[in-house]
Image (spheres, rainbow, N blue to C red):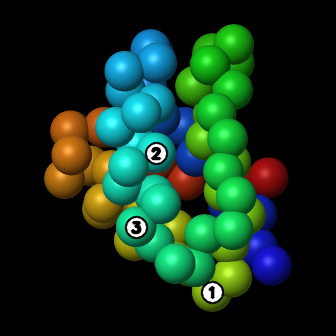
């Protein structure tokens, strides 16, 4: 399992629901959560063999800013 961490432009529940719909379509994702209290509106994903670029591209196509963070 890999843990991927992203800075996002998500700021409200409506946007979280939009992202939830997109991420639940990705079978490699086991779990994900948002930390909207963080200044970077963090998205954490637990997945098996998922490319960070794939997540970024999927969210960006939907108009959500998303950038992988190194940790």
Could you classify mark 2 by the number of other residues whose Cα lies within 10 Å: few (under 14), some (14-19), or many (20 or more)? Answer: few
Q: Quadrant of residue 33?
A: top right
Residue 69 visible in rendering = no
Residue identified by numbered label 1: 49
Q: Which mark is residue 20?
A: 2
How far apart marks 1 and 3 lie (CA) works out to 15 Å
What x and y, as percent, mark residue 32? 66, 51
Q: Position of residue 14 (x, y in %)?
A: 37, 21
Query: Is the residue marked by circle 3 packed among few (<14), some (14-19), or many (20+) residues within 10 Å?
Result: few
Q: Residue at x 20, y 38 (%)?
A: 63
Ranked by sequence position, the earlier of labels 2 and 3 is 2
Is 23 on the left-hand or right-hand side of 6? left
Residue under label 3, please give it: 25
Q: Position of residue 43 (x, y in %)?
A: 61, 41
Residue 9 sits in quarter: top left
Whether pointer 2 and pointer 3 mark residues with C-beta atoms closer than 8 Å, the reply is no
Task: Give the CA separation, mark 1 to mark 2.
Answer: 19 Å
């Amino acid at each position: 399992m890999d843990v991927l961490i992203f800075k996002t432009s998500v700021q409200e529940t409506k946007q979280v629901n939009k992202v939830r719909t997109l991420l639940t379509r990705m079978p490699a994702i086991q779990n994900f959560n948002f930390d909207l209290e963080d200044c970077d509106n963090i998205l954490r994903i637990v997945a098996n063999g998922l490319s960070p670029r794939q997540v970024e591209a999927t969210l960006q196509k939907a108009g959500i800013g998303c950038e992988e963070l190194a940790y």
